[in-house]
Image (tube, grey):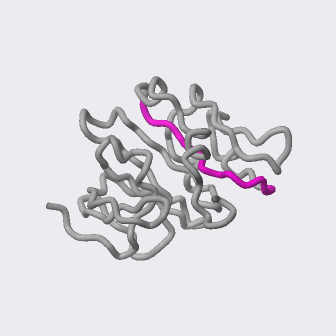
Amino acid sequence: MLYQNGIPTKEDIMGVTPSEERFAKGPVAIVECFQKIPCNPCTKACVKKAIKVEPDINEVPVVDFDSCNGCGLCITRCPGLAIFVVDKTYSETEALVKLPFEYLPVPQKGQVVCGLDREGKELGWFPVVQTFSGGKKNMTWVISLAVPKELAMEVRSIKVGGYKDGQ
């Protein structure tokens, strides 16, 4: 399916998803990069050395979930916008999902945004908890959303311009 429509299968996603045991320890990066291409900026960005591309640069990145602290620096360095951080310890009912974002205007803390799944389907409106810029060189922003825990592995984008003031 991935090569036909760009959408990973459930099996693809399960292959890169941490265990519930790991999710219970705090934020963790999830790399949804499924194509073997020469790319490794995520490995250079990770100060914990939790992301590896081995044996050569053409392999897909693999996360050592036990080493990852979910800082999100790798999100801003991925040219494919394929890295997300999920924190299921955020609250009793919500998870924090950190998403890459490269459009204007950038949503602001306190606004609510329309969250989308991998196919672009609307999943609901979620509050923006935090935003931070990847810097002047790459211009990728990280948008942190509070989403219901059951949607933590589903929300993967936001609708551009689909923002409104929080309620």
The span picked out in magenta is 26-38
Q: Position of residue 120 (x, y in %)?
A: 45, 67
Q: Please, is residue 93 above or below residue 67 in the view?
A: below
Q: Which quadrant is home to the N terminus?
A: bottom right
Describe residue 160's horizontal placement relative to residue 6 as left or right. left
The quarter of the displayed image where residue 109 is located: bottom left
Q: Please, is residue 75 above or below residue 157 in the view?
A: above
Q: Position of residue 94 (x, y in %)?
A: 28, 41
Residue at figure coordinates x 54%, y 47% from the top left: 10
Q: Position of residue 78 (x, y in %)?
A: 63, 56
Describe residue 166's horizontal placement relative to residue 107 as left or right. left
Q: Please, is residue 52 above or below residue 159 in the view?
A: above
Q: Which quadrant is home to the C terminus?
A: bottom left
Residue at figure coordinates x 45%, y 28% from the top left: 20
Q: Residue 77 lies in magenta, yes or no? A: no
In this orientation, which residue lies closer to the viewer: 36 or 66? 36
Q: Position of residue 143 (x, y in %)?
A: 41, 57
Residue at figure coordinates x 29%, y 70% from the top left: 163
- Residue lying farthest to the right in this orientation: 56
Describe residue 80's horizontal placement relative to residue 107 as left or right. right
Which secondary structure is most common in the magenta stretch? loop
